[in-house]
Image (cartoon, grey):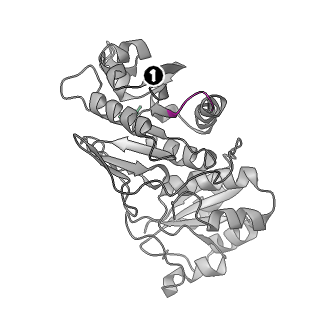
């Protein structure tokens, strides 16, 4: 029996058409499928489901992450794997969010998209879509992954690094899971197997992302932070963990008064943070921040949102954030 794969279409360039106004807008799944007539000849039994209104991924966030996760969980016993077609702009956020939400799922959930619409010459959509189905069919990577260009990445380790080239994604601090050519060469078979965690159904979107730069105005940031609704901060700092504030800065006082989790990541693509290495990062140790290690900002933001929503005590939230969940650290 051919493996049963469910394809969930959310929108994105892969299925876009040019509007009369000259910009790209999402089109229907039927339109997209008309360009891949041979997609169901790869020895799989395909079922399709589409967002009622396919979206540019700029409009995909927590609500849609839960929607996609919900479709997968509802059909977990009916399919051997899932492929999610998605715009590339926020694909790394969705793949990170799904990785954390669906940690307990031991089936392939393969996300992909395209830089060029499937209807246009030179499209990468057909190749990416076909490869994603093959990965889901093989069933060797039983976790959330991102299939793009010649690489299969772990879902919570990716970031979009090129807005034009077909080679649009990188997992800067983690090895790829497979090389995609005429054959798929799996380099790292999923480290997850069996029951390996929970399935979460809640996200807390009260997270503030603060990125440091040399042009830094403490008082305007304090104004932004003056909201009870902020329950956690992802702080992006220079290099391995420095920033232009000291313990006598009003921003330090504000952050320390807030008593909320602060998860720190590096603005550098590679390497991650090492809290306590430089005097210029002393404020981080004083604030008792949580090191984001080698996490991408996408992983940090989504992990914090999911940690805040699913654990109650400060201790448990901290434990969740500090521990490696899906290979992201
Ligand atoms: N703006 C598009 C989107 O993210 C870009 C793409 O899919 O490549 O939906």
Residue annotated with mark 1: 45
Q: Position of residue 175 (x, y in %)?
A: 37, 60
> Farthest residue toward the bottom?
279
Out of 162 and 208, give the one closest to the viewer.
Answer: 162
Is residue 80 found inside the magenta-colored segment of the image?
A: yes
Point 59% across, 59% down: residue: 325
**Magenta stretch holds residue 173:** no
Q: Position of residue 271 (x, y in %)?
A: 40, 71
What's the magenta bit mostly, secondary-structure-wise?
A: loop
Q: Is residue 216 visible?
A: no
Answer left or right for 248 relative to 245: right
Q: Residue at x 43, y 17 (%)?
A: 29
Pick the residue in front: 220 or 313. Answer: 313
Q: Tell me if residue 67 can be seen.
A: yes
In the picture, residue 138 is in which quadrant?
A: top left
List the single residue furthest toward the right: 313
Residue 10 vs 141, above or below: the answer is above
Q: Relative to the observer, which residue lies in front, 158 or 37?
A: 37
x, y (%) of residue 273? 48, 73
State which region is magenta. 77-81
The picture places residue 5, in percent across and down from the top left corner, at 48, 28
In the current view of this chain or complex, which residue is farthest to the left? Answer: 121
């Amino acid at each position: 029996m051919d493996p049963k794969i469910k394809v969930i279409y959310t929108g994105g360039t892969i299925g876009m058409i040019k509007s009369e106004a000259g910009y790209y807008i999402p089109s229907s799944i039927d339109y997209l499928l008309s360009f891949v007539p041979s997609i169901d000849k790869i020895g799989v039994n395909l079922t399709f489901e589409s967002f009622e209104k396919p979206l540019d991924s700029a409009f995909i966030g927590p609500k849609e992450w839960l929607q996609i996760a919900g479709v997968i969980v509802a059909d977990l016993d009916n399919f051997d794997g899932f492929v999610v077609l998605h715009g590339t702009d926020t694909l790394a956020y969705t793949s990170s969010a799904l990785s954390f939400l669906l940690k307990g799922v031991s089936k392939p959930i393969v996300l992909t998209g395209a830089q060029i619409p499937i209807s246009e010459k030179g499209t990468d959509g057909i190749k990416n879509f076909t490869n994603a189905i093959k990965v889901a069919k093989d069933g060797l990577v039983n976790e959330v992954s991102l299939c793009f260009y010649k690489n299969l990445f772990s879902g919570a380790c990716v970031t979009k690094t090129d807005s034009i080239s077909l080679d649009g994604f990188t997992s800067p601090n983690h090895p790829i899971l497979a090389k995609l050519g005429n054959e798929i060469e799996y380099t790292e078979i999923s480290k997850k197997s069996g029951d390996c965690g929970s399935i979460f159904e809640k996200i807390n979107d009260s997270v503030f992302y603060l990125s440091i730069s040399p042009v830094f105005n403490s008082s305007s940031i304090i104004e932004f932070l003056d909201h009870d609704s902020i329950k956690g901060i992802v702080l992006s700092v220079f290099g391995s963990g420095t920033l232009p504030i000291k313990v006598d800065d009003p921003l330090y006082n504000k952050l320390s008064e807030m008593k909320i989790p602060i998860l720190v990541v590096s603005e550098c693509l590679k390497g991650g943070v090492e809290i306590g290495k430089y005097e210029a990062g002393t404020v981080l140790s004083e604030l008792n921040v949580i090191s984001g290690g080698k996490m991408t900002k996408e992983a940090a933001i989504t992990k914090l949102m999911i940690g805040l929503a699913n654990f109650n005590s400060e201790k448990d939230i901290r434990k969740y954030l500090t521990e490696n969940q899906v290979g992201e650290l």
